[in-house]
Amino acid sequence: MRIDIVTIFPEFFDVLDLSLLGKARQSGLIELGVHNLRDHTHDRHRTVDDTPYGGGAGMVMKPEPWGDALDSILGDAPAADEGPTIIFPSPAGEQFTQATARELAEESHLVFGCGRYEGIDQRVVDHYATRGRVRLISLGDYVLNGGEVAVMAMIEAVGRLIPGVVGNPQSLVEESHEDGLLEYPSYTKPNEWRGLSVPPVLLSGNHAAIAAWRHEQQLERTRLVRPDLLAEPVESPAP
Ligand code: SAM
């Protein structure tokens, strides 16, 4: 997969050299381009923002540097279906979920545009929507200072779903949100720690009993913490 990121803080993405995604880059599973939006300005101060039309607090990112930067990435890429998907992280976007990550992991080219200040001039989104797939995606119902952290989270969630990035594909299947439930609790050695024991069923060697216990734990956790994930909400057990 090819990933391009446009940002005024390219250093944010240095961490993509580390861990599984760093290895995926080394092995060529992920090809990354990080582009400084200020390289696409044409004034002495490398200005990327201006005051909002209509007044109000804060500054808005100017459309011209964005147009320059995105055009240089898209080049002659075919429009609509065959071109990359352009993603603008935004608290006003659709909610990012594991299902979104799965959809994006199917793509061959993703372009992320990191907003700052009060966001990007709306015409940038409108213009690129006429040239291909554009998605506004929110990490959650809160406001960050910029899109970089949201893009990092999305790349990590998408990247680990690309075949070959995570060594054991089975570990992806048993994760929270993969089957609509939260994951069961995990334990490792020693089997006693500070007076707390590992649930005996996990030491039993009985695989069917372990699977049943884990599923029950998944249901219980989901009921308690995220009943919204269950199709039919189940009443919490009495405390
Ligand atoms: N004025 C905008 C609003 O109220 O919708 C918020 C702008 S925010 C301070 C600056 C940038 O941070 C946004 O353009 C977006 O790129 C990013 N951002 C903030 N919160 C986000 C979230 N929950 N999910 C994804 N991106 C977010």
Image: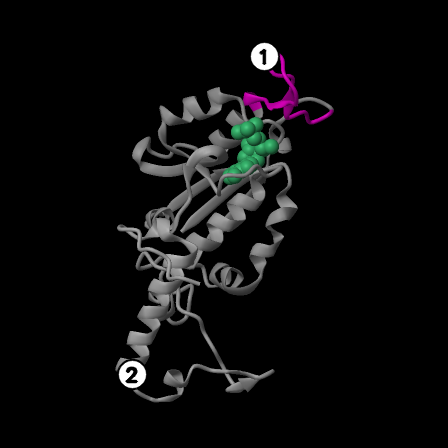
- Label 1 sits on what residue type? Tyr
Is the residue indicated by label 1 positioned so its CB lies within 8 Å of ligand 1?
no
Residue drawn 60% across and 37% down?
Answer: 146
Q: Indicate whether 36 appears above or below 190.
A: above
Residue 51 magenta: yes
Residue wearing tag 1:
53
Res 115 visible? no
Looking at this rendering, what residue extends furthest in the front direction?
Answer: 238
**Alpha carbons under labels 1 and 2: distance apart:** 64 Å
Dot placed on the residue nearer the N-terminal end, 1 or 2: 1
Are the residues tagged 1 and 2 within 8 Å (C-beta)?
no
Res 238 visible? yes
Left or right side of 202 for 148: right
Residue drawn 67% across and 25% down?
Answer: 47
Q: Indicate whether 63 appears above or below 12.
A: above
Please tell me how crowded label 1 is: few (under 14), some (14-19), or many (20+) other residues with Cα within 10 Å: few
| Image x and y of residue 80, in percent | 31, 31
Foreground disc of the pair 1, 2: 2
Q: Indicate whether 3 appears above or below 171.
A: above
Kindly state the secondary structure of the residue where label 1 is placed. Answer: loop
Image quarter of residue 43? top right
Residue 218 is marked as none
Looking at this rendering, what residue extends furthest in the right direction?
Answer: 44
Q: Quadrant of ligand 1?
A: top right
Residue wearing tag 2:
207
Looking at this rendering, what residue extends furthest in the bottom direction?
Answer: 204
Q: Nearer the viewer, residue 75 or 167?
A: 167
| Segment colored magenta | 45-64
Please tell me how crowded label 2 is: few (under 14), some (14-19), or many (20+) other residues with Cα within 10 Å: few
Q: Nearer the viewer, residue 190 or 12?
A: 190
In the rendered image, the quadrant that contains the C terminus is: bottom left
| Image x and y of residue 150, in percent | 53, 44
